[in-house]
Amino acid sequence: MSAARLGYSALYYALLPLVVARLLWRSRRDSDYRRRIGERFGWVTRLAAEDRPVIWLHAVSVGETIAAAPLIDALLARYPSHRLLVTSMTPTGSAQVRARFGERVAHCYAPYDTPSSVARFLRRTRPRLYVIIETELWPNSVAGCRARGIPVLLANARLSAKSARGYARFSRLSSELMDGLSAVCAQTAADRERLLGLGLAAERCTVTGSIKFDLAIDDGQRSRAAVLRTQWQGAAARPIWLAASTHPGEEAQLLTAFTALRRQFDNLLLVLVPRHPDRAAELVALAAGGGWRVQRHSSGEPLGAGVDILLGDTIGELLAFYGAADVAFVGGSLIARGGHNPIEPAAWGCPLVAGESQYNFAQASQLLLAAGAMELVSGADLAARVGAYLTDPALRSAAGAAGRAVAEANRGALALQLAVLAEQLD
């Protein structure tokens, strides 16, 4: 073990009690955080006993799982003799895997990045290939795989300038990490250059685009969206504003905008979907404190008469929600979180607005902005922009068509990344 990784491992072990304490603290609000803790130390179901080669794919949370969905579907179709193991780090990511793929994949939490936990995990699973989605790079996990001759593929890789500066502060460890990657599929040329700057060999990195553009909306999702839209609109044909993947610091701004919009559209329905559904009770209280009548989608009941806000507190339904909405707001953008996926509403032909923090989806946002499919606003301007879309059906239609065209034009990354993956399995 190198001196850099030895120091990193010693620090990780020292901080591990705090990591576990934070996990237990978060479990006060969501008990799922304290369930299956053994998996986080590598005590997972033994897949090595199965007579099937294992592909290990790691998607840290909800966003990465959604991004990986086209790749996972393709792997299940192309490698039926393999066992696909999908790991995540959060309960919401775990729930997303189960909601989206059920028993078609094996699932557990990824091990903490200590040499002992990683070694235990690898002994029990014996993967033939380790696929990391986007940027979830852990030095001991990568090194443990490479020491056992397991290729490591960084798929759909993105690296913001801010993250690159963070990695550069630990240049020796980052260089070792880059050397442990067998192949990298970068979303953009800028992502590739940042990775090369950290020490990645140029011949190992291919620019493929983002597999998020290869999103497939199937007939079941279209039918579900149509049913939801009919239920939500009711006989009065209510306009529907969807605020998706929201965070603390955004909901108050959204409710202020909703208050202004209801003066103009007195039967407007706000469908509010927090990034973390375990915040549902908090948001019900926040909205009710403003005098709004709120219903939780998880109740399973038909939308009640006079409900102002429907709280989307379930897992795995957001894609269909986009198909039921007239206008969408994509969260993580009115605060400095880098924004969430704008491609999903675009693929539906749903016009969208968002805040100006977009570094997580810089390329997609630029394409959608240039096409007139997306508007970036401040909280103060949110009501005016959403109101303009709700007022003008032709504007909605044009923006929606432009977004759909961008999504269609940028498909193809999946085939390129599958080709790179196949090389690593040979």
Image (cartoon, helix red, strand yellow):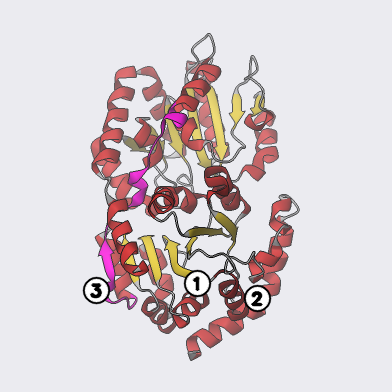
Q: In the image, is 8 to the left or to the right of 152?
A: right
Determine the CA span between mark 2 and mark 3: 36 Å
Q: How far is mark 1 from mark 2, CA to CA?
A: 15 Å
Q: Is residue 403 above or below residue 410?
A: above
As rendered, which of 351 and 317 lies closer to the eye? 317
> Is residue 209 in view?
no
Mark closer to the chain start, 1 or 3: 1
- Work out how far the residue at label 1 is from the one at label 3, CA to CA, in angstroms: 22 Å
Indicate whether residue 268 is drawn in magenta: no
| Residue type pointed to by label 3 | Glu
Farthest residue to the right: give it.
Answer: 28
Q: Which residue is mark 1?
A: 138
The residue singled out by tag 2 in the image is 15
User: Residue 33, position in %: x, y?
Assistant: 69, 56
Apparent side of residue 36 relative to residue 84 in the rendered image (left or right): right
Q: Is residue 136 above or below residue 94?
A: below
Pointer 3 residue: 203
Where in the figure is residue 86, as x and y percent of width and height?
52, 58
Please give the name of the residue rendered at 38% of the width and 81% of the height, measured from the top-left corner: 175
SS assignment at label 3? helix
Asked which secondary structure carries label 1, the reply is loop
In the picture provided, is 277 more to the left or to the right than 175? right
- Which of discs 1 and 2 lies nearer the camera? The answer is 1
User: Label 1 neighbourhood size at 10 Å, few (<14), some (14-19), many (20+)?
Assistant: few
Name the mark nearer the viewer: 2 or 3.
3
Amino acid found under the numbered disc labelled 1: Trp
The amino acid at mark 2 is: Leu
